[in-house]
Amino acid sequence: MRIKKGFVLRDVCGEKVIMGEGLGALDFGKLLCLNETAAWLWDKACEAGDFTVDALADALCAEYDVDAERAHADVAAIVGEWQKVNVLE
């Protein structure tokens, strides 16, 4: 999967938010607030282009002191939320 074109992570008043820009996000009309870890995962997903939950979970384990099972569950949850709001393809 990959992040749809037109969705970007911005710092708005000290909060990390996903927002839509341009025609690709024309019908989005909202901001999604992310915590520090979710914003880090978004950046990693953007860097990767195509990504999997497993790849992001591995990256999370390499960066933070978290066990693989917990990382996979947390990454699967945030990716699921991104899918629900239709920012992934």
Image (tube, grey):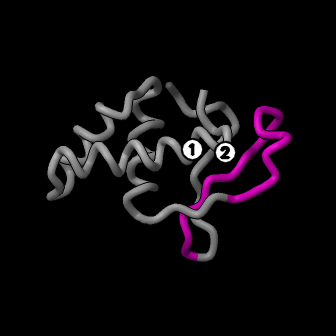
Which amino acid, mark 2?
Val
Q: Is residue 62 above or below residue 47?
A: below
Label 1 crowding class (10 Å Cα cut-off): few <14, some 14-19, many 20+? some
Hey, which quadrant is residue 13 in on the image?
bottom right
Label ID, residue 51: none
Which amino acid, mark 1?
Trp
* Residue 24 covered by magenta stretch: yes
- The residue at the point 67 percent across, 38 percent down is 86
Hey, which quadrant is residue 27 in on the image?
top right
Q: Quadrant of the C terminus?
A: top right
Magenta highlight range? 14-31
* Residue 23 covered by magenta stretch: yes
Q: Nearer the viewer, residue 88 or 11?
A: 88
Label ID, residue 82: 1
Q: Secondary structure at mark 2?
A: loop
- Image location of residue 40, percent across then percent down: 39, 53
- Image location of residue 15, percent across then percent down: 56, 71
Q: Is residue 13 above or below residue 18?
A: below
Label 2 crowding class (10 Å Cα cut-off): few <14, some 14-19, many 20+? few
The residue identified by callout 2 is 85
The reply to whether discs 1 and 2 touch (Cβ–Cβ < 8 Å) is yes
